[in-house]
Amino acid sequence: MKKWSFRLGVALSMLLLVACQPQQVKQGASAIQGAEQSPAGVYVSLGVEYMNRGMYDVALEKLKKALVVDRSSSDAHNVLAVLYDRLGEKSLAGEHYEKAVRLSPVNSSAQNNYARYLCGIKKFDLADQHFNLALRNPLYKSRLLALTNAGTCAWTGGRVEQAEAYYRTVLQRNKHYSPALLQMAKLKFEQQNYLSVRAYLQRFRAVNKHTPASLWLGIQAEDQLANNNAVASYVLQLKQLYPDSHELGLLEKSKFN
């Protein structure tokens, strides 16, 4: 069972980063750590694998089988909730998230994912409580993720100072954590602090390949700073690296095209 638990954590680290934020960041994720081991683990691992392949019908079959084997598997309820969330079945997702955290309060992945879900339905106070429950587990290896998600949820709820405090806590613990660097750059743009946007994007680029979102943000910030050479560089990178991106569509409709 330990072998399957490890594989499940690795697989979920590739599957489950969804931040509650004004512009969603799709990077990285949330491993199951501190969750109770269960005989359903094999089926849960298979469910994760099929989800990664986009084979949602097969994933659903495997996860339902996991619950047949063990109705009390927090991991199974957690992953099934993520799947229902992806399928737009919000009510079912909420039901299984609630079961996951009730069955194993120390399942920090479930706490983080449930908090993300609560943020998505604008229950910001309750979401913050569950993010902090995720952080209480000293064995949780994705604490920086949960802190970043908590910051973005606070920002979505209009609590900009709280959001910045969460992001700064992340960067105090790991100054190279790219999701928090990008979120700080976005927040500073909203605050019209364009020099800080530049600085955070430079730090982001030092540890991570530019994304369509970071390039589009750079274009807008450097335009505000009247740095036409930097604007042109970002525009060229966006066109060359991400020709099919949503951000390129925004570029083509803007004055920068």
Image (tube, rainbow, N blue to C red):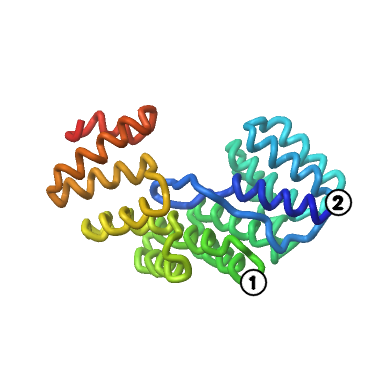
Between 109 and 29, the one lying in front of the other is 29
Q: How packed is label 2: few (under 14 Cα within 10 Å), some, or many (20 or more)?
A: some
- Residue 203, quarter of the rendered image: bottom left
Give coordinates of residue 52: x percent, y percent: 63, 37
Q: What residue is shown with label 1?
A: 138
- Residue 248, quarter of the rendered image: top left
Determine the CA span between mark 1 and mark 2: 25 Å
Residue 32, above or below 60: below
Q: What residue is shown with label 2?
A: 39
The residue under the point 83% across, 51% down is 71
Residue 218, above or below 54: below
Q: How packed is label 1: few (under 14 Cα within 10 Å), some, or many (20 or more)?
A: few
The quadrant of the image that shows the N terminus is bottom right
What secondary structure is found at the residue carrying circle 1? loop
Image position of 238 (left or right of 44): left
Res. 95 in view: no
Give coordinates of residue 55: x percent, y percent: 67, 30
Res. 105 in view: yes
Give coordinates of residue 137: x percent, y percent: 65, 69
Label 1 with label 2: CB-CB less than 8 Å: no
Under mark 2, the amino acid is Pro
Residue placed farthest to the left in the image?
226
Residue 223, above or below 148: above
Give coordinates of residue 14: x percent, y percent: 60, 46
The residue under the point 78% across, 37% down is 62
Under mark 1, the amino acid is Pro
The quadrant of the image that shows the C terminus is top left
The residue under the point 56% across, 58% down is 115
What secondary structure is found at the residue carrying circle 2? loop
